[in-house]
Amino acid sequence: MVMGLTTGLWVSAQVRLCDRAFIPAAVVRRGDPDAGTVLLKINRFEHGVTVYTQASMMDDGPAWSRGTGPEPVTEAVADAYIARQVQYDPDVWVLEIEDRKGVYKIDGKIV
């Protein structure tokens, strides 16, 4: 995550930021509190769901890739993707954000 922050602290901060912006957010799966990978499930309801996964950047800044592809998918497709990732990496965190209006801004670049 951001240099100097554990994954657990970063996730907690994101939940708090969402709470302050009246955006429902929930940690649906806790992973390794120090260094677990994070999946962000952004549910835009009628606009679809996108799951973002952490990506590595050369400059060590936070970056995300669209794990479910370039276009939003159904919630069932997103949940299946998350289930596959959890099987691959049991230390993964899953943060679900219900952002009907598209207000939430991801911390970092989307690659």
Image (tube, rainbow, N blue to C red):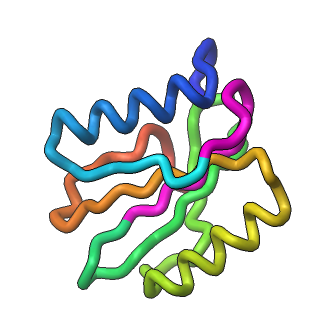
How many numbered circles are shown? 0
Q: Residue at x 47, y 47 (%)?
A: 27
**Farthest right residue in view:** 88
Q: Residue at x 58, y 54 (%)?
A: 39
Q: Residue at x 48, y 40 (%)?
A: 108
Query: Residue 79: where, in percent of width, then height?
Result: 56, 76
Query: Residue 63: where, in percent of width, then height?
Result: 58, 44
The part of the image, by quadrant, that contains residue 65 is bottom right
User: Which of the image's four quarters has the N terminus?
Assistant: top right
Query: Residue 104: where, in percent of width, then height?
Result: 28, 50
Q: Camera-side residue: 91 or 1?
A: 91
Q: Is residue 41 left or right of residue 91?
A: left
Q: Is residue 88 left or right of residue 20?
A: right
- Compared with 69, 101 (above or below) is above
Magenta region, mostly helix, strand or loop?
Answer: loop
Residue 91 forms part of the magenta stretch: no
Residue range (magenta): 30-42
Residue 40 forms part of the magenta stretch: yes
Q: Camera-side residue: 9 or 67?
A: 9
- Compared with 98, 21 (above or below) is above
User: Which of the image's four quarters has the C terminus?
Assistant: bottom right
- Compared with 50, 57 (above or below) is above
The part of the image, by quadrant, that contains residue 77 is bottom right
Q: Is residue 5 left or right of residue 58?
A: left
Q: Is residue 36 left or right of residue 8?
A: right
Query: Residue 48: where, in percent of width, then height?
Result: 35, 81
Q: Residue at x 31, y 31 (%)?
A: 16
